[in-house]
Amino acid sequence: MTKVLDVCCGSRMFWFDKQNPITTFMDIREHYEELDSGHVINVAPDIVGDFRNMPFDDNTYDLVVFDPPHLLRAGPNSWLAKKYGKLNLDTWQEDISKGFKECFRVLKPNGTLVFKWNEEQIRLKEVLATTEHKPLFGNKRAKTHWLVFVKEEQ
Ligand SMILES: C[S@@+](CC[C@H](N)C(=O)[O-])C[C@H]1O[C@@H](n2cnc3c(N)ncnc32)[C@H](O)[C@@H]1O
């Protein structure tokens, strides 16, 4: 069976089927909150884990999707920070770099990584500088990017 891993599932907003049976949903937190703004935060991962040190064996997944927080600055009580999390100002490059390394470690050879990034506060170029892996293609001109990588057989 094909195995999929969503590394930062959050509230699973981009999923058409939020209970997709071939997918393992991971996040670093569990959280439920109904905000005054009407937004609902419902982070209920199958596995609570850290993308910098994932609790999975090497070469396990056919497809990994990596959608880390993309904001450095957001009020701690803002719905954006509550829904999407925030990066650490001092360590974000190292954190994202470890995340890429871990995604490639848990991917099977020839597996696919989909990386999502929004350029609101950090340019795509800066994020891609944290990994030696190069995307094959993606929507280059958008502000929100979906990039596709493959793990080449070693
Ligand atoms: C941009 S949001 C993901 C949104 C999600 N893809 C969706 O469709 O709703 C980023 C998520 O990464 C989680 N996160 C932050 N640091 C993490 C870490 N070190 N390991 C795993 N998840 C992390 C946050 O809790 C947040 O839910």
Image (cartoon, rainbow, N blue to C red):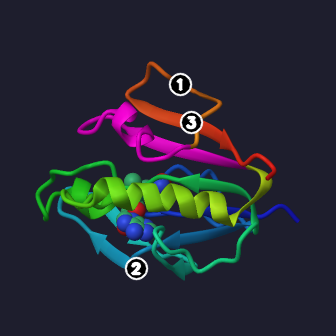
Q: Amino acid at mark 2?
A: Glu
Per the image, the residue denoted by label 2 is 30
Q: Ligand 1 falls in which quarter?
A: bottom left
Image x and y of residue 74, in percent = 15, 53
In depth, the one of 131 and 103 nearer the eye is 131
**From the viewer's perspective, is 11 left or right of 60?**
left
Mark 3 or 1, nearer chain start: 1
Return the mark for residue 147. Answer: 3
Q: Amino acid at mark 3?
A: Leu
Magenta-colored span: 112-132
Question: Hey, which quadrant is residue 4 in on the image?
Answer: bottom right
Per the image, the residue denoted by label 1 is 139
Image x and y of residue 65, in percent = 59, 53
Q: Secondary structure at mark 2?
A: loop
Number of dots carrying numbers: 3
Image x and y of residue 51, in percent = 48, 68
Q: Secondary structure at mark 1?
A: loop
Q: Is mark 3 within 8 Å of ligand 1?
A: no
In depth, the one of 16 and 25 nearer the eye is 25
Q: Secondary structure at mark 3?
A: strand
